[in-house]
Amino acid sequence: MTDLTRMTATDLAGLVASGETSAAEVTRAHLDRIAAVDDRVHAFLHVDTEGALAAARAVDERRAAGEQLGPLAGVPVAVKDVLTTKGVPTTVGSKILEGWRPPYDATIVQRLRAAGTVMLGKTNMDEFAMGSSTEYSAYGPTHNPWDTDRIPGGSGGGSAAALAAYEAPLAIGSDTGGSIRQPGAVTGTVGAKPTYGGTSRYGLVAFSSSLDTPGPCARTVLDAALLHQVIGGHDPRDSTSIPQPVPDVVAAAKLGATGDLTGVKLGIVKEFTGEGAEPGVMAAFRESVDTLAKLGAEIVEVSCPHFRYALPAYYLIAPSECSSNLARFDGVRFGLRVGDDGNRSLEEVMSLTREAGFGAEVKRRIMVGTYALSSGYYDAYYGQAQKVRTLITRDFTAAFEQVDALISPTTPFVAFPIGARTADPYQMYLADLFTIPTNLYGGPGISVPCGLSEGLPVGLQVMAPTMADDRMYRVAAALESVVGTFTPPAL
Ligand code: GLN
């Protein structure tokens, strides 16, 4: 039989449903692959071998009993370590949660289990999802399967690398400023950020609550859509969850795969001039624009004049929210506690714990956020940033009166060498130049592989109006039907 780890989730689910293979066999194949390559990739922080095999056996028993299985039953999935998993370590890539085993599952994890998917383990990430390269993980970097001396993107580099290295056919990420799409782009995989509120944040360790959006990662657009369908939809336990059904993203991906975009109007953002982007990335993007036009899409230029302020606004809003959210890591309630020798005050123990438990980037964000929110500076920084956010939202609204979706490169550059951008935080922040506007607006965005530059993958981003997630899947699947999927040179 062909190597099970090379198959799509769609095909694996079909083989399990028909009885040609078992969920246990599929799971063992992926666990073996992890054992063979993950010392070089380091996509996983924790592999739940026993839990995965037990979940797989349960699916096989249900099938044997004649139960109707869901569309992804028996398919393994890797989960970013930002989501709580009952009894399974959850660190958020931070020392401050080392050893913590949550007493409950995130809603998304519950839905994954109910759908009969098999959780392989937890994937590496930048600490608290702050970063663009997975180099800020307290547990060491993840390596890009295309070139293990390079970064796999971030913050969800572990999930994307697990897909590209064929360690998992599906993965979950979270996107606050680009952390699903950007790793997708630089690993040649697909990453979708759903509409904010379209996927539940219950059990997602909070970074910036008004931006955080969990979502699907896969090697094909259809697989991402199937996963989106399983995890998405209203959750009464998340107050910002949208009480509406997920648009039919699976049907949209299938429609797109026919390669016909007649009647679809796509906008190129005039202000994304390509300044600061690599020529090879822009060349691959332009070629994809031609491809989309050949498939029948009408391409027009639209102006979004406030997008140029998105990065500075984001880097006030996200740290502000993080400074508040991360106050709960105090050495009392979860994980690490330092200096509690019976002689120190509560404040001293908290301070020692936070000093030892948080890395440099997390501390930098907490300090920036605390400053931006302090009385006297609130209006000058946080207040201004919120106004800019409104202006960016208006840019999107106006653009979507003219076009069905916007397209851009996903990232300004291909995967860079490990260590190349850690010295200057601003250089790291630039990685999310094209992805951040969508987060500030709240709409959905997807990255789909669109070509190579110097032998490394380039992603194209499709951005759609809020609750029109189906549109981006259609466009992405149409492009994929021409350019195909991408396989890294053998690991
Ligand atoms: N790179 C951005 C940041 O560091 C986005 C991270 C994310 O989407 N979680 O904040």
Image (tube, rainbow, N blue to C red):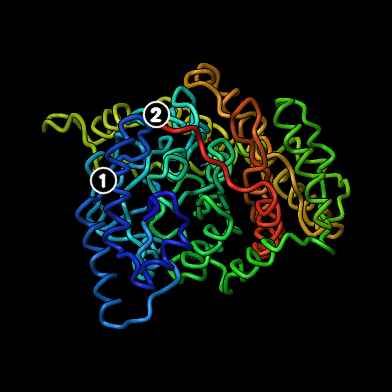
Query: Viewer-nearest of labels 1 and 2?
Result: 2
User: In this image, 334 relative to 2: left or right?
Assistant: left
Q: Please, what is the three-letter code of the amino acid marked with disc 1?
A: Phe
- Relative height, residue 218 to residue 37 (above, below): below
Identify the residue at horizontal 77%, vertical 62% (top origin). 260
- Relative height, residue 121 to residue 361 (above, below): below
Percent coordinates x, y for residue 133 in the rendering: 49, 31
Q: Please, what is the three-letter code of the amino acid marked with disc 2?
A: Pro
Q: Residue furthest left?
A: 342
Toward the viewer: 320 or 100?
Answer: 100
Give the numbered dot on residue 334: 1
- Relative height, residue 291 to residue 150 (above, below): below
Percent coordinates x, y for residue 164 in the rendering: 47, 41
Q: Residue furthest bottom?
A: 66
Q: Label 2 crowding class (10 Å Cα cut-off): few <14, some 14-19, many 20+? A: many
Which quarter shows the N terminus?
bottom left
Percent coordinates x, y for residue 25 in the rendering: 28, 58
Count every numbered label the image shows and give the total: 2
Toward the viewer: 279 or 177?
Answer: 279
Which quarter shows the C terminus?
top left
User: In this image, 210 relative to 81: left or right?
Assistant: right
Q: Does dot 1 land on a helix, a strand or a loop?
A: loop
Percent coordinates x, y for residue 221 in the rendering: 58, 56
Q: Earlier in the sequence, mark 1 or mark 2?
A: 2
Q: Give the residue pinned by disc 2.
A: 141
Q: Does dot 2 land on a helix, a strand or a loop?
A: loop
Identify the residue at horizontal 48%, vertical 36% (top origin). 130
In whole angstroms, how far apart are the C-alphas of marks 1 and 2?
24 Å
User: In this image, 275 relative to 56: left or right?
Assistant: right
Disc 1 under 8 Å from ligand 1? The reply is no
Rendering quarter of residue 158:
top left
